[in-house]
Image (tube, helix red, strand yellow):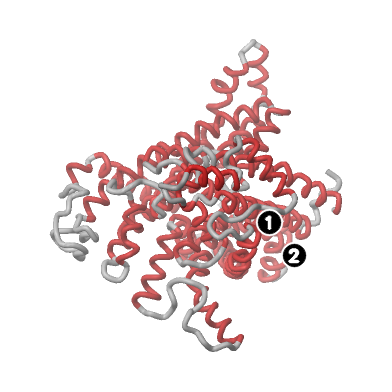
Amino acid sequence: MRKYILRRLLQLLPLLIGVSLLSFFVMHLAPGDPTALFTDPNIDPIELARIRANWGLDKPIIVQYFYWLGNALRGNFGNSYMTGQPVINEVLARLPNTLLLMVSSYILTLLITIPLGVISAVKKGSWFDNLITFLSFAGMATPSFWLGLMLMLLFSVHLGWLPAVGMHDPLLHDPSILARVIDVARHMILPLTTMTLLSLAGITRYQRAAMLEVLGQDYIRTARAKGLPERVVIFKHALRNALIPIVTILGLSLPSLFGGAFIIETIFAWPGMGRLGVLAIFQRNYPLIMGIVVFSAVLIMLGNLLADLGYALVDPRIRYEKK
Amino acid sequence: MRKNKFAIFGMSVLALFILVAILAPVIAPYDPSDMVDDETLPPSRAHLFGTDDLGRDIFSRAVYGARISLTVGIVAVTIAILIGTLLGATAGYFGGLIDGSIMRFVDVMLSFPSIFLILTIQAMLTPNIYNVMVVIGLTSWMGVARLVRGEYLRIRELQYVEAARAIGCSDLRIMFRHILPNAQAPIIVAATLGMAGAILTESALSFLGMGVQPPMPSWGNMLMDAQAYMRDAPWMAVIPGLLILVTVLSLYFVGEGLREALDPRQYHA
């Protein structure tokens, strides 16, 4: 197992180089350079040349890339053009907020999707199953940002129950920890609901399909023939096996969850990595864009690795070493 | 049977929307960019979907928006299918080093949240409707490539392929005349679902201001305009979103129906 993990971690490196190379060249496709965006158009050309040289923009792109890569491998992702702060600090400051949202959404999704998928599969063809099937499709077809807007319209604009944007109430002066936690939780409800409803839809379809497939297996018929109660057949024999593909789906859905985070964080002004990324793109903040691309790629790859390991954990038939 | 009802519903909605898109000038009562009445009027007999913040007729804009959104979806998915099929077929047919390098490239492309890559490209180019189609196409072919590769890996071992090789058919001929027709079914399903994805992506991009540019109406940029008027004109936000939802939902239903009809082996549910 350790060998397998090591090999997988080593495979990450070329993949990351590919990811960074691709995004670096995509960024530099643009005519002109970022200095045009935030310097006075009447700037002294000597001063402009100094700024460009300072940011390394006067060198050929390929040289710039290797310069970036060399620094990145040593953990230095450069400084944000906007704030002058190291990119790594900016990203790490926002990362916990994104993870808070994503991990909560994952947990919530799992807690809801498993029972829904199981009941839907066991009662295949019932009104409940039809409803869940219809709702899953509708969930997959809903644009994330629109769902966010609609929830905001209902719960913030009309009912006034929940704050629409941000993570903290700037007027909150109660310093107690409990008050702060409640404040963040209230701000989190809308983005979290949006994110969860969207990932719920797709995963419930998979959970249902996996459960249906397992229920058609011979060993389920055997279990029933032995006279085991239906409850034991479903929860002990079927569910355990139906959970296996879900582990993979959870890993595979990471990129779309990240993609969703970019948009959901933007609408709800949630101070996470996604919103930072969208801002960085609008500002053509090259080092920050690169930093966020690399960070999300690493998180996605580690997520996939964890999913593969989880796969082996829940299914003793899978052994990575022997391969 | 139940599934087919869903599929027929989807087909009808799509047919209706395509008809509306083609006949847009006939159906739309007003010019989509004309300021025809007061601002933010609620839906009424004169303005079926109300008017927006500039006094434009939302129904007319939605009708023209259907044109834009459907066109973007079709063109983007065509690009994605072409690239995906070409790369997947090459990887699956030849195998070995070619397969390895193509699939590693797929892995790289799949390690990005694609919306981030698309946004970056769009920000670097000047966003317009043509870029949107191309960029969405260029960033959504990976699933198709994997799928086609799998089909080719399976089919290339079949006896009829061996027979074709024995009578001296060229690799290209075997790949596209002999194998491709047998790999068609999953590609058609992927195209339907891919079009749904492309329409969703276009709407998200236009919503962020990085897609179809005003005054050209798309369902996504209508939502962008709506954001500032949520309190006073909620219909501006509700209607375009519902249109996207219904279109994408119909595509999913059709896709699932096709999957069931064309490929019973892959169909479990």
Q: Spatial distance from mark 1 to mark 2, Cα to Cα?
A: 40 Å
Which chain letter goes with mark 2? A
Amino acid type at mark 1: Gly
Viewport quadrant of the C terminus of chain A: top right
Instruction: Please give left or right for residue A222 compared with residue A193 in the image.
Output: right
For residue B140, above or below residue B96: below
Q: Could you tell which of marks 1 and 2 lies nearer the N-terminus?
A: 2
Q: Residue at x 51, y 41 (%)?
A: B190
Q: Position of residue A290 (x, y in %)?
A: 60, 49
Which chain letter goes with mark 1? A
Q: Nearer the viewer, residue B92 or A12?
A: A12
The residue carrying mark 1 is A303
Which of the two discs, 1 and 2, sits closer to the camera? 1
Q: Nearer the viewer, residue A315 or A10?
A: A10
For residue B58, above or below residue A54: below
Element on which disc 2 rests: loop
Q: Residue at x 59, y 88 (%)?
A: A176
Q: Residue at x 64, y 54 (%)?
A: A295
For residue A204, above or below residue A47: below
Element on which disc 1 rests: helix
Q: Position of residue B145 (x, y in %)?
A: 58, 36
Q: Residues within 10 Å of mark 1 (few under 14, many from 20)?
A: some
On residue B18, which mark appears? none
Q: Position of residue B50 (x, y in %)?
A: 21, 61
Amino acid type at mark 2: Lys
Q: Nearer the viewer, residue B124 or A148?
A: B124
Instruction: Please give left or right for residue A77 compared with residue A128 in the image.
Output: right
Q: Residues within 10 Å of mark 2 (few under 14, many from 20)?
A: few
**Residue A4 visible to the viewer:** yes
Q: Residue at x 38, y 49 (%)?
A: B10
The residue carrying mark 2 is A226
